[in-house]
Amino acid sequence: MNFDYKAALKNIPHKPGIYQYWDSEKELIYIGKAKDLRNRVSSYFNNPNVNAKTRVLVSKIRNITFTIVDTEIDAWLLENSLIKKHQPRYNVMLKDDKTYPWIIIKNENYPRIFWTRRIVRDGSKYLGPYASVSMMHNILGLIKETYPLRTCSLPLTRQNIEKGKFKVCLEYQIGNCKGPCQDFQTEDDYAHNISEITDILSGKIGAVLRGLKTDMDAAVAEMNFEQAHRLKRKFELLENYQSKSTVVNSSITDIDVFSIASEEKYAFVNFLKIMNGTIIQTQTIELKKRLDESDEELLTLAISEFRSRYNSHSKEIIVPFDIDLDEKSSAIKFTVPKLGEKKKLLDLSQKNVQFFKKERIDQYEKLNPEIRTERLLTQMMKDLRMNQLPRHIECFDNSNFQGKYPVSAIVVFKDAKPSKKDYRHFNVKTVVGPDDFATMEEAVHRRYRRMLDEGTELPQLIIIDGGKGQLSSAMKSLKLLGIEKQVTIIGIAKRLEELYYPGDQYPLYLDKRSETLKVIQQLRDEAHRFGITFHRKQRDKGTLVTELDLIDGIGKTTSGKLLKYFKSVKKIREATEEELKEVVNTKQAKAIITYFGDKKIEATDTEQG
């Protein structure tokens, strides 16, 4: 069985993350990381120069799954966790003692800062892990250059320092330490440095820079230029610090994270398992709704399934909303985070479930276009506060040229698609001058008067291209016909895409990315295009016929015949009397020859004068 990798690639985003390859037995055979998932995965199939082992791997792929993350560094971390957990056949396995390093702020007086691969629960703070060892050493180098800290392991208690048990070492002499062992640096000053370092490692460098700027300005004001120079150097070093990696606090350990995204018939639940600040398991499942189950019911079911499947006994579960579970007791804590590291994990889970949902829905709708239609119409019904699906929608638009040649156009969408055979346009009959409101009133009345007379089914939704004025004019006609309660009618104003309802002074604003708004915009634009095309034909026709109307004995009907036969006024002007008599009688032919003959004489006299 061949694998359609081109179809699979279409669903993979240009985002950082990890990808997983599965064989025909649904066994995980490879896990990889990528800065750009689609580009990396496609390279396996489109590169003719891959080695023999890679070709064997590619030949066995029957399914591809992926997990998106915020940064490439996060992809490194997730790849490491999943490889160690699942040990796929085609991955280079990492030894257990080769785990990623952390930066530790030691729990002691005058804390030291260094890196370690081993986490000890002694109250110390661990920041990381760092997928790139070189990046971690760069950060430690920046800290060492910016904040002189002690590197010795002396027991610097207040009692030992006051007894003078220690002497400063070479690190003090060369400026790498400020000598807290001999009380040359106060404990408060040291703690302030540790606080700034913690902020830097946690990504809060902006707060540190603002504090340094304040201290710098104060030093300049006091004319302490030496101190100001030191602060400026520190400021510049930190400003150039460009590390943007996501740092997970190691205190977040053994928790489950769940998020849900649902549609009318389906729901999708994502699960992340966190151990020691690292994601070790991730999966998204699909639930098909049998009844109208709530998100809470579906999430409850999924939590039970995932915890059983992964044998999880986590004491804390992160969820997107409050839920009431039988499991809920003092042994299990349910958290709906608003800020901090746990909120970041929930956001990551929600990002994955939303992407998974979009991918699956796109697949369904590609295979079954009617599913998309039903979903879209249902969404429009909800968004526009209707009580029936808008299967038949009509949109009106008016056009005129300086008050002349007013026309109205109607476009029709059925099942959210253009039905061009039902498009109509009107030459306005009762309106004199540029009165857009009266033009709309006439067009709406004529349209639905005829539909009622012919027994045609009315649309569920009518859209008026215009604001409150045009909408009110359309409503007058609907009320006159007695059908104002049988249809939903809205107006769309171009400037801010506001949607107006009759009798409601406040407009409705839809999300600019909303599918409902996109369909309404498509209707509006199509009505405008259709109306403008017809209007230009009428205007051009009116401009051409005008000169012929000036000839005695030539009316609109005769003008139309002449233009139809000769195609243009120029050819009529150049025609002989015999040629003209093919269309008109002898008297009319002579009148045309005389008229254009006089025009030529006038032109000649003008040139000579």
Image (cartoon, rainbow, N blue to C red):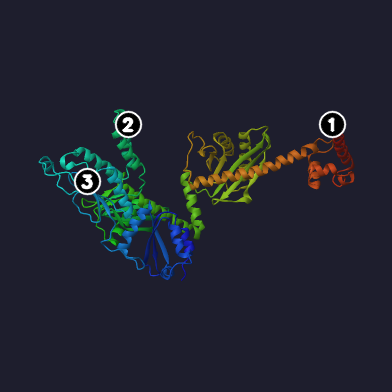
Of pointers 3 and 1, the one earlier in the residue sequence: 3
Answer with left or right where residue 255 lies relative to residue 67. Answer: left
Q: Position of residue 451 (x, y in %)?
A: 62, 45
Q: Which residue is mark 1?
A: 606
For residue 267, side relative to residue 146 (left or right): right
Q: Three-letter amino acid code at disc 2? A: Asp
Q: Earlier in the sequence, mark 2 or mark 3?
A: 3
Residue bearing mark 3: 171
Which amino acid lies under the numbered mark 3 shown in the image of this protein? Glu
Element class at badge 3: helix
Mark 3 and mark 1 residues within 8 Å of each other at the beta carbon:
no
Farthest left residue in view: 163
SS category of the residue bearing label 1: helix
Q: Which one is in front, 158 or 24?
A: 158
Given this view, does label 2 or label 3 mark the residue nearer the observer? 3
Which residue was labeled with disc 2? 217
Q: Position of residue 565 (x, y in %)?
A: 81, 47
Position of 157 with respect to 551 (left or right) is left
Q: Are marks 2 and 3 in contact (CB under 8 Å)?
A: no
Mark 2 or 1, nearer chain start: 2
Residue occupying the point 78% across, 39% down: 556
Circle 1: is it few (<14), some (14-19), or many (20+) Cα within 10 Å?
few
